[in-house]
Image (spheres, coloured by chain):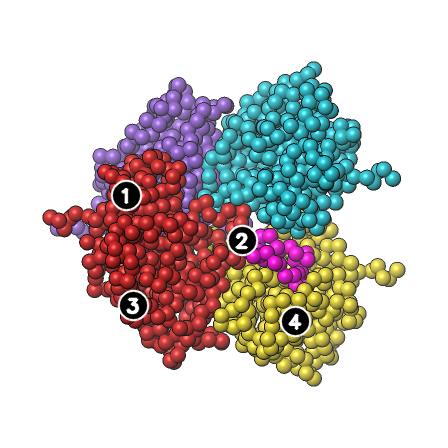
Chain colours: A purple, B cyan, C red, D yellow
Amino acid sequence: MAKNVKIPVGILGATGMVGQRFIQLLERHPWFEVAWVAASERSYGKTYAEAAKWKMKTAIPARIAKMKLSAAEPGGSGASAAPKVIFAALDADIAREMEPAFASAGCAVISNSSAFRMHPQVPLVIPEINADHIKLIEQQSWHRQSGGFMVTNSNCSVMGLALALAPLDKAFGIESVFVATMQAISGAGYPGVASLDILGNVVPFIKNEEEKMEEEAGKLLGKLKGREIVPASFGISAHCNRVAVEDGHTESISIKFKKKATAEKIINVWREYRGMVDDLKLPFSPAEPIFYDERVDRPQPRLDIERGHGMTVSCGRLRPCTLLDWKFTLLSHNTIRGAAGAALLNAELLKSKGYLE
Amino acid sequence: MAKNVKIPVGILGATGMVGQRFIQLLERHPWFEVAWVAASERSYGKTYAEAAKWKMKTAIPARIAKMKLSAAEPGGSGASAAPKVIFAALDADIAREMEPAFASAGCAVISNSSAFRMHPQVPLVIPEINADHIKLIEQQSWHRQSGGFMVTNSNCSVMGLALALAPLDKAFGIESVFVATMQAISGAGYPGVASLDILGNVVPFIKNEEEKMEEEAGKLLGKLKGREIVPASFGISAHCNRVAVEDGHTESISIKFKKKATAEKIINVWREYRGMVDDLKLPFSPAEPIFYDERVDRPQPRLDIERGHGMTVSCGRLRPCTLLDWKFTLLSHNTIRGAAGAALLNAELLKSKGYLE
Amino acid sequence: MAKNVKIPVGILGATGMVGQRFIQLLERHPWFEVAWVAASERSYGKTYAEAAKWKMKTAIPARIAKMKLSAAEPGGSGASAAPKVIFAALDADIAREMEPAFASAGCAVISNSSAFRMHPQVPLVIPEINADHIKLIEQQSWHRQSGGFMVTNSNCSVMGLALALAPLDKAFGIESVFVATMQAISGAGYPGVASLDILGNVVPFIKNEEEKMEEEAGKLLGKLKGREIVPASFGISAHCNRVAVEDGHTESISIKFKKKATAEKIINVWREYRGMVDDLKLPFSPAEPIFYDERVDRPQPRLDIERGHGMTVSCGRLRPCTLLDWKFTLLSHNTIRGAAGAALLNAELLKSKGYLE
Amino acid sequence: MAKNVKIPVGILGATGMVGQRFIQLLERHPWFEVAWVAASERSYGKTYAEAAKWKMKTAIPARIAKMKLSAAEPGGSGASAAPKVIFAALDADIAREMEPAFASAGCAVISNSSAFRMHPQVPLVIPEINADHIKLIEQQSWHRQSGGFMVTNSNCSVMGLALALAPLDKAFGIESVFVATMQAISGAGYPGVASLDILGNVVPFIKNEEEKMEEEAGKLLGKLKGREIVPASFGISAHCNRVAVEDGHTESISIKFKKKATAEKIINVWREYRGMVDDLKLPFSPAEPIFYDERVDRPQPRLDIERGHGMTVSCGRLRPCTLLDWKFTLLSHNTIRGAAGAALLNAELLKSKGYLE
């Protein structure tokens, strides 16, 4: 019977765009159940339906709609006491203060924020490619003191890229990567990008995004050696642009390998890739982490973004590069694979490995 | 008095999008006057207003609206005889047959088509950077036989790039260039891109575009040696994408130089650049061929595309590249600087150099 | 066992946008199974995957992808023989010739085309509101001669409107209706609307659309009296516009009733409405044909279009009208409720009533 | 010589979208010259270029870029003293306090805000149709006390409509009007509409907009009788929607007249209309206040919005209405004719009539 008891989880930043995705994706999750929602001070005491400007295409789950927003504090009593598993969808500035408070209080903080991604004791995890990094948790002082800890997922722009690079790195050794992104507006939250800025336009700038892509890629593909992550050493140069797309980051990528790779081999490597967690049968783990599309003009965000319920990364247009070795196009869902779905998959990994007990 | 007599010009493909731009830009041109318009067979005999689905934001010039469309043949008599100066805005397949027919008949064919751009005796010209290439005309058999000739401008995606690279090549020597484009829908003509393909979407494929960019860049920045163009030898890799923008190609560029360049020097080189034709005072020559914008999130197509009446290329976001040396963003108007305006500037150059007499 | 045998159906115009929707919606349908696909001559003999430019967001069903396209003729033998139930997604001009040929050959032709909608013996059906109109089939000469017949669904712009009006007409009596539409691009098929025409634009004209709305509304809400439909007699004036929306027609409506209606009563009438076919438990029949949304700025196509799997019509913003009595906003899915889903629901009705045996 | 001295004007709310339009349109104005710019407190002391997120497609005029922002107070000394002619581009809440302060201090306040439009002593003016309403100024207590006064222009959605209705009312007598708008995002200012709300979407709600349209139409077309405006008595019902268009409100209109009107007569009335101020030769007064476009699918915002430098209202698609008498489509530029240009034309009228001396 205990099998059927779901783990209660809380959501910090529950009314924002990523918070809404958490609620949407956790509805009917086999392992987790939303038990607590918190948002900024002006929402305390309101119901979720009153406080959130719900922008998902499915209705607010009825149970959540009626739920009262709690103060964003680990303490509290009764209904307002935070559960021990917390999904955090906070702005970096707020996360920097709030996430450690929850970890100190003994919570498992599964964060989508950038605040602690590059912290040497905080794992930055995409389960398929670096599930073993979660052992860093043991190094966290929060963990030693309260049992709480923090695990993060990467920036939405680098998530799909890292996933596509991981098996190639293993097979051929990556030497350098050039990437130019065309990123969706949902990545900026709500209200986020003003319509006057993006309708019929391209904005060739997203604050700190290129820096995040370049540094997070190294940590994601790095190796856990003893008590630390040794970052991958390939060179990477990112150009980040915002385009008038709702969901889905498209990326133009060139890549140089250490060993010789043919198109056929690269495509095979992607198609056969199952990642480190295939045996765990995690609910949010897609059957195919990477899909290679043979069609000459794909992937495209409007058509391909829902593949694998938004958890599969789509690649296409593999062709020789006159400067590096190969070039291709990549598409990944920025608010599912790149944010809420990423955190959920991390939570599932943590549960499977016994960290949420 | 003869000074005030304008040169009569004809337009092949006058009803298409580039043809419409020619008509819009030639209205009130101090040197040229539209005297003849031709389009596909189904339009013969109709007035221009009847035959063209006019999509410009200014009204059809009244004089042109009433003009009858001629057959697309160099011969003809009376009103339907083609003038000696022809702007050609044709699809490549049609251009391949039609443009030589006009050149053979003694016309100066100033073409926007890709058909003959890479022909060894046909100059591919951006006046600011390679005005001297027009001497290739002397090598053309058409010229020797009839006095007619052909001059082309480049693909819209490489035009702005070549202009921004030219002074840098001179100052620092270019070794290699990465470019990822986000191209406007107007580049595909009308009806061109289906709205279902591009609304809220990115299409990571434009047929033959990457090939054109890579090969035309070499010829544009090449040197005329004796009777031929020796192409520039830098490496270039292009990724071409279509985005939901009406006018203006935005490009993310990384570049490696032979000599050391600082940001300050690069910006100065751009700002001081006046090009080879500054002394000719050509009407369509912009005061600044290249504008460097200091603002962190510029250039943007919706805001910056009209700079220099669509003839100035805007650069911005110059910053170090972790793989090559520098990276920046570039914007140019694809149907003015990249098509009709380019051909017009070529015509002005030819006139100044005595080729249209 | 026979219970599990699905009815084989064919699709005319299977590669177009509505044809693609048929294939998408019929995948996993409990009663019907695609057995035959036909398209224009240039597709004969190709596989469906080769012939169709698939634009749905789900993948082509694998079984259909491999299916060979048949000639669009009722005859044929073996695999290419058309089944007895045909969904027709043809342009009106082609439908005018082809649909009668299939009906004459004994097929049940369930058509989305406008060609025969106003034919006095052809029922124009929305099952919830006028399921009884299918008795018109008995009047069709095709039916008497071959057993074949034709049933149509309405234009996408009037479908949602008629559904919202039907219960109001019953409760209060409709006297007159104003409607201004903002219609999605998918209603025009593929390639359909050129991107240069609609990006950042409104096109205040859709050929014949206002005429169709005005005349079809009367037939849809008409009464079957003996052997004919007596059209409803209310006045209706339509303004049709195209906007940059992918799926979902939004409509601004004003309405005058014969009897006094309050907002509360109108909303109740909508909410309690179940339509004529609720007892039949048709698979595509939505639990709620009409949903009234209390939120001040809803319905919106991007957020509300998938309600009831695209089969529920959303209403909102009911408020007094200074000229007529009440005004409100309506949204319906133009390619599901307004086209392929409509035809499918008609087919389910026909099957339930024994017409497909 | 004094002829050449321009009148110094100030702009309240100078950094917002309408403020930016004022600055753009006043550049090179023959009569007025920007001498003072004010914005919210956080901008005081900054230069205009620092404080404004400039979103116009032309560059910030160099002289204005360097201008220091003043406190938004009528007093002040030296450079920061407000001039006697003030264009106000303020939110209604702020305008309610600030505009009377300037009028009390002796300034001519030419306002684009809604705060005082319906005030019985404040004229709501479109010079072509009700220039005589400015006599209301004499009734203002501000005017009697300090010589200052206030004049307003209408909401952007009703401006074009009122202009198109005015000559029809004179010719045929208007009985009732139904209007459904599709309004551009620029009408909401910056940041205004969130891109997630409008990309590929329609928002069928703009707060208070329908109320403003309905009440302002009556005052605009009303008659000055003695000391007050007697509003026009026709019925009007408005539906307001936001669409993904940058500039230009498109409106679907049905209209009922008191006298019989033919299409030919209506079009003639529009074409011949010159309005009340034609003889004054005001710089911003368009040669044609109303343009009727014969093309079946026009006017369209992307193509027709710049007509008459944004001051001409475009009408098209005149056709019979089954409920009222006639229906047509209208387009007007919401930030030029509907806001900054409207205020400027009002200022020109005031100057011509001696109110700015």
Crowdedness of circle 2 by 10 Å Cα count: few (<14), some, many (20+)?
Answer: many
> Which comes sooner in the sequence, label 3 or label 2?
2
Labels 2 and 1 within one chain? yes
Task: Return the x and y of residue B282 as percentages of the image width and height.
Answer: 75, 35
Disc 2 residue type (three-letter): Asn
* Residue of label 1: C75
Of marks 3 and 2, the one in the foreground: 3
Relative to the observer, which residue lies in front, C175 or C296? C175
Q: Quadrant of residue D26?
A: bottom right
* Residue of label 2: C201
Labels 4 and 2 within one chain? no
Disc 4 residue type (three-letter): Pro
**B58 over B336 or under it: above or below:** below
Q: Quadrant of residue B231?
A: top right
Labels 3 and 1 within one chain? yes
> Which comes sooner in the sequence, label 3 or label 1?
1
Q: Secondary structure at mark 1?
A: loop
Which numbered marker is on residue D167?
Answer: 4
Residue visible at 66% across and 82% down in the picture:
D228
* Residue of label 3: C227
Residue visible at 63% across and 67% down in the picture:
D264
Mark 3–mark 2 Cα distance, whole angstroms, equals 46 Å
Mark 3–mark 1 Cα distance, whole angstroms, equals 31 Å
| Tag 2–tag 1 contact (CB < 8 Å) | no
**D64 over D271 or under it: above or below:** above
Task: Return the x and y of residue B251 as percentages of the image width and height.
Answer: 55, 36
Q: Which residues are magenta?
A: D289-312
Task: Return the x and y of residue C349 as percentages of the image width and height.
Answer: 25, 59
